[in-house]
Amino acid sequence: MSGVRREQPAPGPAIDVASALARADEQKWSFRVRVRRQDGPADTRSRRWDEFELPWRPGLSVHDCLEAIERDPRTARGERVRAPAWDASCVEGRCGACTMLVNGRPRQACVTLVDPLMLETNAASLELAPLSKFPVLRDLVVDRSSARAALRRVKAWVELDREPAEPSVTPSRRRLALAPTAGASSPCIGCAACLEACPELHAGSLFVGAASIHEAKLAVDLQAGSPAADERLDALMGPGGVAECGKSQNCVEVCPASLPLDESIASVARAATKRLFGRWFARR
């Protein structure tokens, strides 16, 4: 989508990337990795760029590049510096910890390959920066606690000790009926890429974001007809809730799990509207 910020990395060594990759077995070549640095929380005066030069090899990921820099943290000018800090955990694209801006777009470092990125820009260089919607702790590490707080605001979990009020089917049959939907809706990895790409999320914004709405929608579906489901809808109808979504669908474009975030938002909006009219008519 046009709203997703894209940046061209600074020019690397002059090279035709496509030709270099085509004759990779015949010659050795290198590429540049620019890393945004910051020494500590709120230490904005220390913001700077460090540029590193790495030898190319097939199948390199962004995570591999950062590990190579960590082993020998020398800039392209030969200056020895502190190794960049970044988050990593599963290294399988399942946890979202390593999400950062790669060439201006939120991506997971562990599963983002270097070759396609350089072919995309025809530049032998990459640019790595921290997510911009969260406070920087150090270099590429950010504090994503606001994303977890948003989940708490909308009660995006299932309370197993509370059963639906007067369910139309028994709880076990209800869970069985909803199992396909739950399985399709649950693999959010908490990477916060959707929040990074969302134009509605900015300084001073209360918007909870697509991930929280999606997870709350799953909880509402699993406890439909219960007071707990109504509490979640009430939270989603309040400030920062589903009504503040601008429908840009940037979240759908950047979600590494390919979740149907737009469908979840639309479903919650319909349920919220239904509850709003239901409450209005109940007072008449």
Image (tube, rainbow, N blue to C red):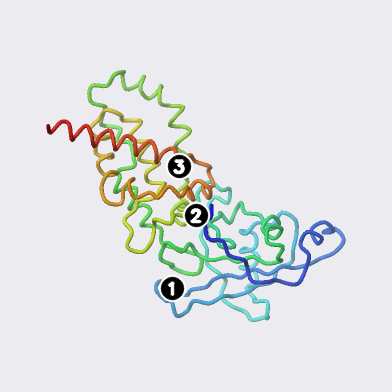
Q: Amino acid type of disc 3? A: Leu
Residue 93 shows which numbered tag? none
In this rendering, the answer to whether 94 lies above or below 81 is: above
Residue 281 located left or right of residue 252? left
- 61 vs 146, left or right, is right
| Circle 2: residue type | Ala
Quadrant of the image occupied by residue 276: top left
Image disc number at residue 97:
2
Q: Secondary structure at mark 2?
A: loop
Residue at the disc numbered 1: 40
- Kind of residue indicated by mark 1: Gly
* Residue designated by label 3: 261
The tag earlier along the polypeptide, 1 or 2, is 1
Q: CA distance from mark 1 to mark 2?
A: 19 Å
Circle 1 Cα neighbour tier, 10 Å, few/some/many (<14 / 14–19 / ≥20)? some
Q: Residue furthest right?
A: 26
Residue 135's spot in the image, x, y percent?
A: 40, 66
Residue in the image at 51% along x and 47% along y: 255
Assess disc 3: are there few (<14), some (14-19) or many (≥20) residues with their C-alpha within 10 Å of its C-alpha. many
